[in-house]
Image (spheres, rainbow, N blue to C red):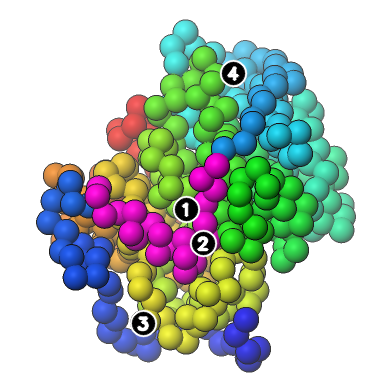
Amino acid sequence: MAQQKPFVANYDESKVGTITLPDPLIIGSKKISSQADWEKNRATWLTLFADQMYGQMPKKSVKQTNTLISQKEILGGKAVQSIWKMDFAGKVQATVVVILPKSSKKVPIFMGLNFCGNQTISTDDGIPIFDKYVVCNNDPKFINNISQAASRGEWASRWQIEKVIDAGFGTITAACGDFEEDFATGYKNGVRTKLAIELGLKPEDWTANGAWAWGLSRMLDLAQSIQQIDGKKVILHGHSRLGKAALWAGANDRRFAAIISNESGEGGAALSRRIYGETIWRITNSFPHWFLPRYASYADRENELPFDQHILLSLMAPRPVYVASAFGDQWSDPKGEFLSAKEMEKVYALYGKKGLGNIDMPGLNQPVGKLIRYHIRDGKHDINEYDWEQYIKFGKEEVK
């Protein structure tokens, strides 16, 4: 890990300077000039990210058993809420909440992990209280980083369940801690340790981001087994650190129909070469379990990275992607997130798809783009009703 030192974030754009980004269409001495070339060579970029940043993803599968625990109507009969238990080789279990509109047709869904337990997405008392470590700790809702009954609905505003249902979409979520608890040694009680033999990876071969991404793919397996869900229209979303995991999952698992990054910042959608807000040094010192130690070695030498985050976003091609920022969240470098989304255009053009085009950083609350979209809204680091209004519109136009 990098040597400890005082950290002062840069928020002066003039100090960022000029940066030169690696070209996603140049891999070694090879120039990519067609869709077929990209498809043949995209794995090289994916491997670089795995080797240098996020860690390996399991190539082996594990026995997964999905069991329906409970089911009931909610929202005045507009929706059906189901609680499922996923079991992996009898060693790891994850509880998943599935909320679907009542419909005679298969429905598209939004899927994402939550930070502090399924009970935080709704006040409904049918959702079990999460009993593992969570990052939330505001007493009396959470005590010693363990969820209390008072935490029901604590983050309901981040999920906007009724608005999503009214738009004809479903919601699926699980707590990230069911796959790996979010602290430095959380891997000891998660899939990286408990399923090491079955998955053929040592805990140090991958990361918390990898464990969460793997969990998202297993949730997709569950979704595609549920008759009422259109398994080809699953929109993956994530906020903050879980936005990083969503991007890594989307890059590795192309079954996801679209990907949404909400303020994922450093190590997510933001360009690492822009020394603005959070940096590699800061994030790897604060959260060493999110990335490989090798990634931490690029602190203060970001220009030596063999990639940058625009290439991670490009690995979503040709699927729809939405990147979003907040003006009150300069720590996540909104401009770096916008530029990263803009740089995806080169790869999407190979598929005959348009990117953000010749536009500058948009104003507040002025979404831009279509298949690739971006907005910066007013407000703080959060995912709120405004964001969901844009994501629902995005889903209707590009997926549904």
Q: Which portion, as a residue range, is magenta? A: 39-60
Q: Give coordinates of residue 317: x percent, y percent.
A: 29, 47
* Residue pointed to by mark 3: 303
Q: Amino acid at mark 4?
A: Ala
Judge whether 291 appears above or below 58 on screen.
below
Marks 2 and 1 close (CB-CB < 8 Å): yes
> Which residue is disc 2 drawn over?
54
Give, as a three-letter code, the residue at label 1. Answer: Trp
Q: Amino acid at mark 3?
A: Asn
The answer to whether residue 82 is seen in the rendering is yes
Judge whether residue 259 is colored magenta. Answer: no
Q: Give the labeled residue for mark 4.
A: 79
Q: Nearer the viewer, mark 2 or mark 4?
A: 2
**How many residues crowd around disc 4 within 10 Å: few (fewer than 14), some, or many (20 or more)?**
many
| Kind of residue indicated by mark 2 | Tyr
Callout 1–callout 4 Cβ contact below 8 Å: no
